[in-house]
């Protein structure tokens, strides 16, 4: 499951999520992500979450620069001894 700041709907499914990431990053020439706070991690059994704020510095292919901070939450499940990310939600921090 994926929700990014510009998304208009929730993206669900192992096939749909990579396609959505490709579309998200298609207009970008460069991307730098810096952790501003967190990650704050909580593990309960075979589930975990990581939350925090990240700053994204984006350079679009035409040359325009964008800087934005987002709240991010990632949800993980432990399956067959491996941690898998099952949800990523990001929303812009109000300015």
Image (cartoon, rainbow, N blue to C red):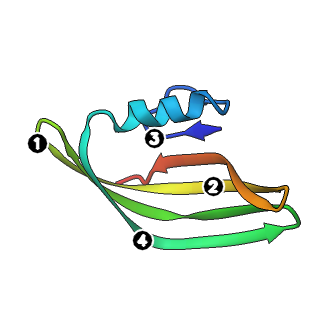
Q: CA distance from mark 2 to mark 4?
A: 16 Å
Residue 26, given in percent of the width and then of the height, sits at: 32, 33
Q: CA distance from mark 1 to mark 3?
A: 21 Å
**Left or right: 48 as drawn, with respect to 64:** right
Residue at horizontal 59 percent and vertical 39 percent from the top: 2
Q: CA distance from mark 3 to mark 2?
A: 14 Å
Q: CA distance from mark 1 to mark 4?
A: 25 Å
Name the mark on residue 63: 1
Can you identify the residue that label 2 sits on? 74
In front of the other: label 1 or label 3?
1
In front of the other: label 1 or label 4?
1
Residue 88, given in percent of the width and then of the height, sits at: 60, 47
Can you identify the residue that label 3 sits on? 5
Residue 38 in the image: above or below residue 74: below
Helix, strand or loop for disc 4 = strand
Residue 16's image quarter? top right
Nearer-N-terminus badge (3/4): 3
Nearer-N-terminus badge (2/4): 4
Name the mark on residue 36: 4
């Amino acid at each position: 499951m994926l929700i990014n700041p510009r998304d208009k709907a929730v993206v669900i499914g192992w096939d749909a999520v990579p396609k959505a990431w490709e579309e998200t990053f298609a207009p970008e020439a460069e991307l730098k992500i810096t952790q501003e706070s967190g990650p704050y991690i909580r593990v309960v059994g075979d589930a975990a979450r990581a939350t925090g704020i990240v700053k994204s510095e984006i350079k679009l292919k035409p040359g325009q620069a964008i800087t934005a901070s987002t709240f991010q939450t990632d949800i993980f499940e432990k399956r067959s001894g491996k941690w898998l990310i099952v949800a990523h939600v990001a929303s812009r921090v109000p300015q």
